[in-house]
Amino acid sequence: MRRRPAWPYIALAAGFATTLGGCATEQVDLRTLPSETPAADDAAAAENAAVLRAALATEGDETHEAPAADAEPPVTPAEAPSLLTYDPWERMNRFIYRFNARFDEAVFLPVADEYRRLPRPIRTGVHNFFDNLSQVDSVVNYGLQWRLRYGVRSVGRFVINSTLGIGGLLDVAKRIRLPDAPTGFSDTLGRWGIQPGPYLVIPLVGPSTLRDGVGLLGDYGTSYAINLAGLYRGNVSWALGTTHAVDERANVDFRYYASGSPFEYEAIRFLYVRRRLIEDEALHRKPPSKQVATLPAGE
């Protein structure tokens, strides 16, 4: 029988002795675990929880104080605006909405991006020019709304910008604090009590209502009838209208489907109609009456 070599056992014994020697030269601390006391631990945890609940209750009483007497009451669900919108032509409107999105991405937006490359003074002058032309339509509609004071202001803006502003390229009226408040035939219809009507998406225009659509036709008819400086007839009107549309698109930051929401159509519909209703309320709101302060008798 062949005997195994003894050198592995000798090496193992030597290593074990070395380890013991090294441990003997170091200081060894013995630590014992605390004894388990589940009943005492449970009692302490319950006490801490009770203290925490009392602290939270005290903090809640301090932060939720009674509202002040002059604070406005919170809005109730009955007072909140309804998310429902009258949209009987929804199927057609959604189709036109998708068409407008594709046209905007393929044609309108690239042209507007190139337009933005023009120097800012040129783009500002073009925008001011079209804004000055719109004052003519505002004067007519302010007269139909019997808001003569605003009509006079629009006349002043048009005269000042057409003369001192070099044909409307400069908005001099704004610098002398003559604000711009454009209006149109849709506002005139609203002033006469005609409701916005059903929601309508107009091709190449976007969100609208039936009344706003009629208002666009009325505004175009007014401009065509007056034909200021011969700009609204013939080939000039096509070039003018195209430039105006590109300028308007370049000044709007909206991008179709940029929100990533599957309810973009519903959100835009609600916001547009809600804004129109708020503007209609402003049309019928009476200006605050000036009350003369009276002194008590004897003073």
Image (cartoon, helix red, strand yellow):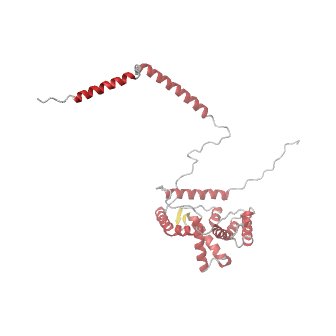
Residue positioned 46% across, 21% down in the render: 43
Snapshot quadrant of residue 217: bottom right
Task: Report the front residue among 132 and 71.
Answer: 132
Residue positioned 84% across, 45% down in the render: 295
Query: Of all residues shown, which one is farthest toward the right?
Result: 298
Q: Position of residue 112 (x, y in %)?
A: 56, 68
Snapshot quadrant of residue 41: top left
Residue 170 lies, with reference to residue 1, above or below; the image says below
Residue positioned 51% across, 25% down in the render: 50
Q: Position of residue 59 (x, y in %)?
A: 58, 31
Q: Is residue 220 left or right of residue 85?
A: right
Task: Report the front residue among 169 and 158.
Answer: 169
Q: Position of residue 93 (x, y in %)?
A: 49, 64
Report the number of discs: 0
Residue 134 lies, with reference to residue 24, above or below; the image says below
Q: Position of residue 95 (x, y in %)?
A: 46, 65
